[in-house]
Amino acid sequence: MKKRNSIYSILVLFCCLYLNAQQTPAPNQTTAITITGATAHIGDGSIIANSVLIFENGKITTIASADATITPKGTHIDATGKHIYPGFIAPNTTLGLVEIEAVRATDDDSEIGMYNPHIRSIIAYNTESKIVESMRPNGVLIAQITPRGGRISGTSSIVQLDAWNWEDAALRIDDGIHINWPSPFKQGHWWMGEAPGFTPNKEYSKQVTALKEYITQAKASIASKKDPKHIPHMAMKGLFDQSQTLFIQVASEKAIVDVVSFVKENTFQKVVLIGAYEGYKVADLLQKNHIAVLTDRTHSTPFNEDDDYDQPYKNAKLLVEAGVLVGLQNSGQMERANTRNLPFQAGTVAAQGMDTEKALQLITGNNAKILGIDNLTGTLAVGKDATLFISIGDALDMRTNQLEHAFIQGRAISLKSHQTKLWKRYAKKYTQHTGTPKQ
Amino acid sequence: MKKILVSLCLLCITISIHAQEYFPKNDGVKTSNTNYTVFKNATIHTSPTTTIANGTLIIQQGKITAVGTTVSIPPNSTIIDLKGKHIYASFIDLYTSFGITLPKNKFSNPYGGNPQYHASREGYYWNDHIRPETDALTDFKYNTKKADALIKEGFGVVNTHVPDGIARGTGLLVALNNKGTRGDRLISEQSGQFFSFTKSSKSKQLYPTSLMGSIALLRQMHYDADWYAQGNASTKDLSLEALNAHKKLPQFFEAGSRIDGFRADKIGDEFGIQYTIIGGGDEYARMEQVVATNATYILPIHFPAAYDMTDPYMANLVSLADMRHWNQAPSNPATLAKKNVAFALTTHQLKKVSDFTTHLKKAIRYGLSTADALAALTTIPAKILKKEALLGRLQKGAYANFLITSDELFKEGTILYENWVQGHKNSIHELDQTAINGTYDLTIGDTTYQLSITGKPTKPVATIKLGDTTIGNTLSYKNDWVSMILRDPDTTKTTYTRIVTSIADNAKNWKGTATLSDGSTTGFTATFKKGNDTKKQEEKEKKQTVVYPVTYPNIAYGTTQLPTATHTLFKNATVWTNESSGILEAMDVRVKAGKIVEIGKNLATSNATVIDATGKHLTAGIIDEHSHIAAAAINEAGHNSSAEVTIEDVITPDDINIYRNLAGGVTSIQILHGSANPIGGRSAILKLKWGESADQLLYPNSPKFIKFALGENVKQSNWPSYSRFPQSRMGVEQVYVDYFTRAQAYEKLKKSGKPYRKDTEMETLVEVLNNERYISCHSYVQSEINMLMKLTERFGFRVNTFTHILEGYKVADKMAAHGVGGSTFSDWWAYKYEVNDAIPYNAAIMHRQGVTVAINSDDNEMARRLNQEAAKSVKYGNISEEEAWKFVTLNPAKLLHIDDRVGSIKEGKDADLVLWSTHPLSIYAKAEKTMIDGAIYFDIVKDKAARKAIQKEKNELIQLMIQDKNKGLKTQTPKKKEKQHFHCDTVESIH
């Protein structure tokens, strides 16, 4: 009886939410919620097979094996046979910055100019994006919103995906600076009459020097006591006091080696490579220098004709085996809509022989560490945000990634979207037409 | 007969004399030189296979009058004794643009701004890139400097043309006679008709934008020429007139690559034309197909320089295929010769004409016989030109075009002394200059040095030693005079001794004067000891010609032998039949002669290769209804309808994506035309038989398909183009109304028996009207989807497949009623406005309304994971696993009308099977073996071995390249060649 009541209250909670075009953000958690019986995937590589998880006021207060005698609190959800995961974290996205790529008016992901550290993504992040709400039914609950373009693209921020406004969404504002490292290779532009292949980039050293000089200048500006301050330079202050992470988009082995020297020269402490397609060739170097990697999307084609067909599938595994801190990200073509497939990208790494819990860690615990939000989220641990979900099965596999409940900071969020609404509406259309629904 | 020949010869001579005679002369007396020049005691190579020892060659007025051993020497002769020397016919280059200056058009993006859709000219063909009326003679201006470069390499005659456009008009044959007049030099003002696949730089007319457009245009041009020849056209078309007038001339096609050569030959076959194909130098990799063309080839010998591999990071850019081509390309001429394919050689594609001899010698080192090399430069080009009486052989009546050499022509160290063209001498190296290579005792005063002379006989280099000390020196040798400067043996001094002597009298014992550093003079001698050992050098060079074996295809992951269908038994698998029997546990499946022959439990082995499938899943191969891999072109964007083009013309069987698709369990694909226009091009349906030729990949008796497209792409919404109809969905409908109305009228006229102009575009649309060709239509929003269904119903046919069909769920009932299938993405959306309402539940809703649903890729990456995409239908819309699996196998087979052959595991069907490591819809599944027609084209175990083999071969080739660099040979910067990855909205860069 008690159980039924609690299910009703959850239902009531959900029903309130389906009023507007976009999903209405859920209110703060007021009652404790207890989830029992589920396999809890902690996000640090471990599981609790039959678990009890309690969260109150938005924070996890208990996570333990059901064997321990723990009294359920507040609303009880029986999740026997089901699975609990920490909310998946999608780093390096442009969610909420672009709605429909082909419609220029909806594009807010990049600025003109080469050096834009002062450009801040957070203020353009659109919480009402239809794409953002479509992340949640797949378990993607947190994202890093990152500007694109230029040599220094700008400053990113980290948000949770259920909020009224960017300010409310923010988990960590201005968390990192994003650099696009020069490429040692130059690709021909066919529309300029060039062969579409790659050749050595003759400007490479010059471009690297220019970037290094910019950083040196920034350091000098930050040390300066004179006004007016140099706005772009000042935006990088956090890189030098370790309050910000430096993200560097880089692909080839040579460039990665150069990045490592650059990092050492500047004594940057928190550095993350994005992409690092050839990172596996210098994995030891990365490990030794404590440089983390957010690999290219696993669902991509090998860069070279001769490469192993599964190179992008296994890159993360190779780096993990070398002791590098690795997470997954999904930038690239049609990146926003496809970000919801992040769990399946982790599943693909598991298919290469990585332990599934380790693969899960790539998009939970590791991503949280890499983004510097592991104090808040990323694993199911006492004191952390209750940002988590219940799936009927293995959330890394498409067939069984089926969410029943999801919570962000303890708030029971809607799992509906523009897409699920259209689904219901048109499924209904055919019952209207024929009188009986076809099954 | 002989008499006729003689009188013909006489006639020729008289004509040539008359040609001069009727010109008035005011600067002197009018005489003509009728003296003979006689070359005697030479080894005369009258043809590549016949040699006269101690022969005599007599020429007069630019022609050969006699050649043989017992010829009588006329009294008015100048006699040149060529004892020990050789005479050869000089070379012919069939493919040049000698004397033609092309307008240098700066490349501009043809899609920038509003493109030009119509022809710029009137009175000519409707397409500016068809220029058969071009007469190279009009543009021709003899270029003495360029002629000299060719003469130095041994050429006497070149064929030239205007290398611009798809039909390029006629060329001319010119003797490289620097001293003659234009009239003397011109051997033929119409030596042949020239074609290619590339557009003219003289016009910006957009069509064709693709290789398949060029191919279709060539076909239509031939149909139109026939129509025109029959007098059916009402207006003048100077292009077609010229094309028809030059039909009987030799027909040259610049293909530029092996595969384009096959494509050109195929067009020729359709119209009864045997083109002489200008190849790409990569023919060696598919000789069986080269032989099958029956064509004579003109081969470039622009063998690639080694890549500079000293920087390993940069070396990573170069693919195994490109490294191999470096290694294999020099064997190209030899390989063709071995297969008895006739070919000529050309300087075309060489960076410098002066590289010709070096490259030719390389080809010889790589196995080309000197006789074949000579034939490729003399008799074969003469034959192609139908000028065998005049060119290519040393025979009576032929042009006096010949070479005088020190030894056999292509031997290392042989000197080309003279190249005579039309009886005029071009001296390249002094005829009588003696080679001085060898070692000598050089005595100056009381000191004896060791002198060693090496290098080219015409450019000798000296090494001088006094004991162990090397003496700095410079040597010059010209007109029998040797002079040297020797530095003082004491290297702290900068003083010199000079010696000079003429060796005209005795080349073995030099005697002369030495001027010492103090100005005093003394005598010196140099006594010949022995010649240089050249054999060792040659052998050394030969040793290095290791040619790596060609694979199928000739890139990474190719195999030296194609897999064959064997008797195979899969034991104890979970079998996804896609039939009423459903998913069967612990079943055996027998495959024989490419077919599934038996499904059952505990089947007898009976000599089959047994594959233990315990714990594994066996399914029908995945079929991708919407693919753009393995094609050289996807969009013909030049017109709003391109029904005349077909992807079948542009299959590229060596695309690595085929292999990667196999590794994802894909066995069949439909390569669709892109979505650049409402009526796109015809499809190609392939089995991914990795390594097979383009033709072998195509389904036999393939169902016929054409791509249509609706929405943003066809109205060009997403790029700044405002001049092409249609610009709205309203206009799209009218494009169809227009074309189908015209197609109906066309068919009516065709059936009436009256003359009609054969139009490939209309022929295709008539097939559509008659339900003989199926439409796969790119579509997004419900309004346009319904429009096309209603429109086709009005014209009496139906749409076969809507592809993309992202709003199919909104009109699924109407689709089911129309009988059209839906081939969709699992979850793509939000990339453009018309996919704003795309939902991942689309497949499920359409399926539940009775629409045959497939999940496709339109993407070379996603194609590798279509099993996962199918699995998303379980997540989005609760489709059963068994039905979801059909979305990527049986259902696309149905949509493609190949479900009688593939798509399920059933006795009698093609053995296109995939063995999965686990449940095929699981994210954790890997394709372990992919079988097509009973042969295994992907095997995860062999893949592992291939990876190692690729690393090994690359490493060996890198070592060889570094050796080349260390030898001081030219290298090139590492490059990574890239094929474009196509989606249906990719507009390709070809042309």
Image (tube, coloured by chain):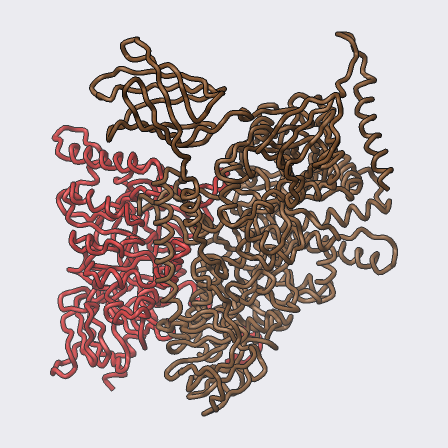
Q: Residue B104 vs residue B547: left or right?
A: right
Q: Can residue B254 be seen in this view?
A: no
Q: Residue B717 vs residue A209: left or right?
A: right
Residue at (30, 26) in percent of width and height: B449
Q: Is residue B86 visible?
A: yes
Q: Quadrant of the C terminus of chain B?
A: top right
Relative depth, front residue between B370 and A173 = B370
Q: The brown chain is which one?
A: B
Q: Quadrant of the N terminus of chain B?
A: top right
Residue at (36, 27) in percent of width and height: B462
Q: Which chain is red?
A: A
Q: Position of residue A297 (x, y in %)?
A: 34, 58
A393 in relation to A348, above or below? below
Residue at (39, 28) in percent of width and height: B461
B806 in relation to B136, above or below? below
Q: Position of residue B410 (x, y in %)?
A: 54, 40
Relative depth, front residue between A311 and B504 = B504
Q: How many labels does the image show?
A: 0
Relative depth, front residue between A191 and B781 = A191
Occupied quadrant, residue A237: top left
Relative depth, front residue between B699 and A306 = A306
Q: Where is residue A422 in the image (x, y as percent from the top left)?
A: 46, 66
Q: Position of residue B372 (x, y in %)?
A: 60, 47
B168 in relation to A419, above or below? above
